Image: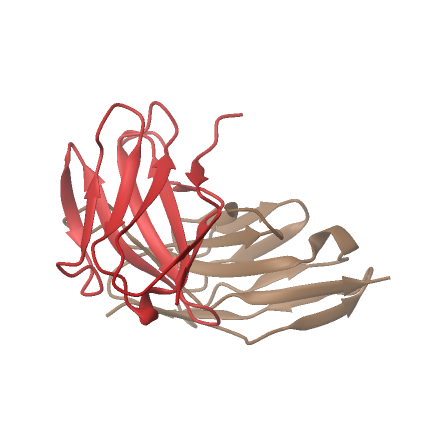
């Protein structure tokens, strides 16, 4: 069964460093998402992406964040200069074309630890 | 704005016990409602969903009914197993101008013991 994959599973970085979190969505999906969960808190929406552009972003998704679909398979989240408060579990999700199902399929997450 | 409130965990039950995890929501319009489950070391998996009032979602013995009058979507299972131990997330989805973002609750950890 196709699934969303994410790498790495755990990333440790120093404050101020750039990190790139990688996701491979399910191949025929067209909508892509990033969410995050700070330990003990809610899963929060960060950004949605469709047709090679951001379709919606939350107030968390400031200028330090960017997303990209550099080729036909990867979907990346970049944090330009990490802060301690960026430590969280980051989930990627993808959704099939509109009109099929409205379910978002999630990856296993990347745990980001900023020291 | 939209929000989802879940009962806090962890919830610890003996095998074959009855499970209820409460979920209430605040939203304008008519959202779709979901329960996601996260097993240890895995991603979020859709457990069940309901798209309109009075719909009942069910899967793997779990059920939840979309109650508009009480704005609730409580998860129930008649007889839990050790393998049900996981974190359960209630979520709502409202069509937005963008790509249909999910709003999640904080998650409820369930531990089932022999």
Q: Residue at x 15, y 61 (%)?
A: A62
Could you tell whether A38 is left or right of A53 in the image? right
Q: Residue at x 48, y 26 (%)?
A: A2
Q: Colour of chain B?
A: brown
Q: Residue at x 56, y 67 (%)?
A: B108
Where residue B44 sits: x, y (%)? 50, 49
Q: Is residue B81 visible?
A: no
Q: Quadrant of the N terminus of chain B?
A: bottom left
Quarter holding residue A55: top left
Q: Is residue A42 visible?
A: yes
Residue at the right extreme?
Answer: B114
Could you tell whether B67 is left or right of B99 in the image? right
Q: Of A60 and A28, which appears nearest the observer?
A: A60
Where residue B59 sits: x, y (%)? 61, 44
Where residue A7 sits: x, y (%)? 43, 40
Q: Quadrant of the C terminus of chain B?
A: bottom right
Q: Residue at x 15, y 33 (%)?
A: A52
Q: Of A79 and B43, which appears nearest the observer?
A: A79
Where residue A48 sits: x, y (%)? 23, 46
Question: What color scheme is it?
Answer: by chain
Q: Compared with residue B43, is residue B80 higher up or lower down, i.e. above or below?
A: below
Q: Colour of chain A?
A: red
Q: Compared with residue A64, is residue B24 higher up or lower down, i.e. above or below?
A: below
Task: Say how many tags the image has.
Answer: 0
Could you tell whether B17 is left or right of B86 in the image? right
Residue at the bottom extreme?
Answer: B8
Q: Of A75 and B92, which appears nearest the observer?
A: A75
């Amino acid at each position: 069964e196709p699934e969303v994959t994410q790498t790495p599973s755990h990333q440790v970085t120093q404050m101020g460093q750039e990190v790139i979190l990688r996701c491979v969505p399910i191949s025929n999906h067209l909508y892509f998402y990033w969410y995050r969960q700070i330990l003990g808190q809610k899963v929060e929406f960060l950004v949605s992406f469709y047709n090679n552009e951001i379709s919606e972003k939350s107030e968390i998704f400031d200028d330090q964040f960017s997303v990209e679909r550099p080729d036909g398979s990867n979907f990346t989240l970049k944090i330009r200069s990490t802060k301690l408060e960026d430590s969280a579990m980051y989930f990627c999700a993808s959704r099939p074309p509109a009109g099929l199902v409205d379910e978002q399929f999630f990856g296993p997450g990347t745990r980001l630890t900023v020291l | 704005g939209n929000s989802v409130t879940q009962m806090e965990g962890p919830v610890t039950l003996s095998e074959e016990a009855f499970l209820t995890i409460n979920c209430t929501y605040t939203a304008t319009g008519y959202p779709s409602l979901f329960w996601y489950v996260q097993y240890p070391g895995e991603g979020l998996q859709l457990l069940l969903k309901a798209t309109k009032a009075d719909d009942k979602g069910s899967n793997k013995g779990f059920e939840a009914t979309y109650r508009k009058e009480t704005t609730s979507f409580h998860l129930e299972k008649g007889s839990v197993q050790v393998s049900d131990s996981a974190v359960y997330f209630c979520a709502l989805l409202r069509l937005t101008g963008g790509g249909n973002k999910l709003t999640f609750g904080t998650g409820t950890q369930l531990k089932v013991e022999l």
